[in-house]
Amino acid sequence: MVRPVLLKLWHTSPATLFSSISGRIASLKRRSGWQTIQNGPLRGVELCVPARSTRARRKDSWDEMLAGELDSFIFSTLQERIQLDGKICWDVGSFIGYHAMYFAALGAEVTAFEPNPVNFAMLRLHLERNPTLGRRIEPLQVALCDNDGEMDFLQSSNIGGASSGSHLTCSLPPLPSGSYSGFQRSKVLTRRIDTLINSGHRNPDLIKIDVEGAELHVLKGGNNFFKNASPLLVIEVHHIRLMFEIHKLLSEWGYNVEILDKAPLEPSRCHIIAARK
């Protein structure tokens, strides 16, 4: 059940924004089609996939999702470290819900955080289309950060391309600033991990973070939580400076940090897994 303190994040939005987002989603659906994931725990799950003409011609993340292979190195590593059946998982930066549904398929109860309104609409669409998994996932249109309130957010409505690059303006995103010239500035609601825990959310056993350079802000927002809990962390780190600062902070909290060496390495980012020593 969605908690009262965040109920409006699910049900309401300014009328002009709602109209704009509804138009974009309607347009997307006209240019998209429902396709079925072929393999893995999500076999049989349906995704609303953008038309190939709106995507890169080479194999992309949508193809990997439909094959059930996207970020398989993360899931295989997690299954060696934690039994997710019955566990609580937070998917921070959920995009259109692939990871959240994967965690749910492995038995977890999932809270999916996604501030981009276009991504969030697609996330809800996928949960409605796949109700067996959708019942295990609570979607919240909120950005986790180190303050409670609102923050400037750069977003893209291009679900077939750059949409996952949307980010809080406090971030250290992986690409040069000119790469986001087509993005729009808006305001999003922000909450701290500590605030959510204090408002009644159960302690997560696993937190996956993919927030385009705001990773450190997310962690700092849970300073009190991390003093009393030891969730397993999987983080996509988007900046070399962030890697240094995140490693320092997690070490201070007693975490051991490892690079997921099966990940496809890119100069601007890498994936880490962190567990309490």
Image (cartoon, grey):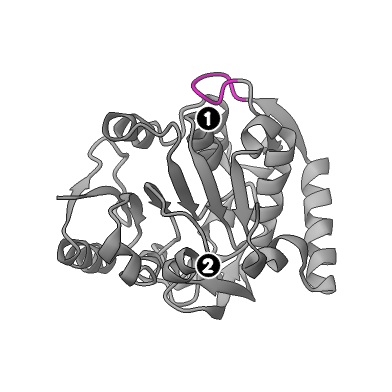
10 Å crowding of disc 1: few (<14), some (14-19), many (20+): many
Describe the element under mark 2 as helix, strand or loop: loop
Q: Position of residue 112 (x, y in %)?
A: 55, 51
Camera-nearest residue between 144 and 57: 144
Q: Position of residue 263 (x, y in %)?
A: 30, 39
* Residue pointed to by mark 1: 105
Is residue 182 something one can see in this rendering?
no
Q: Earlier in the sequence, mark 2 or mark 1?
A: 1
Amino acid on which the number 2 mark rests in the picture: Ser
- Residue 188, compared with residue 251, is above or below; it is below
Identity of the residue drawn at 68% across and 61% down: 117
What's the CA distance linking mark 2 and mark 1?
A: 27 Å
Is residue 94 something one can see in this rendering?
yes
Q: How many marks?
A: 2
Describe the element under mark 1 as helix, strand or loop: helix
Camera-nearest residue between 149 and 202: 202
Camera-nearest residue between 185 and 267: 185
Residue 90 located within the stretch drawn in magenta? no
Identity of the residue drawn at 63% across and 61% down: 3
* Residue pointed to by mark 2: 199
Q: Position of 138 compared to 247: left or right?
A: right
Q: Which residues are magenta?
A: 37-43
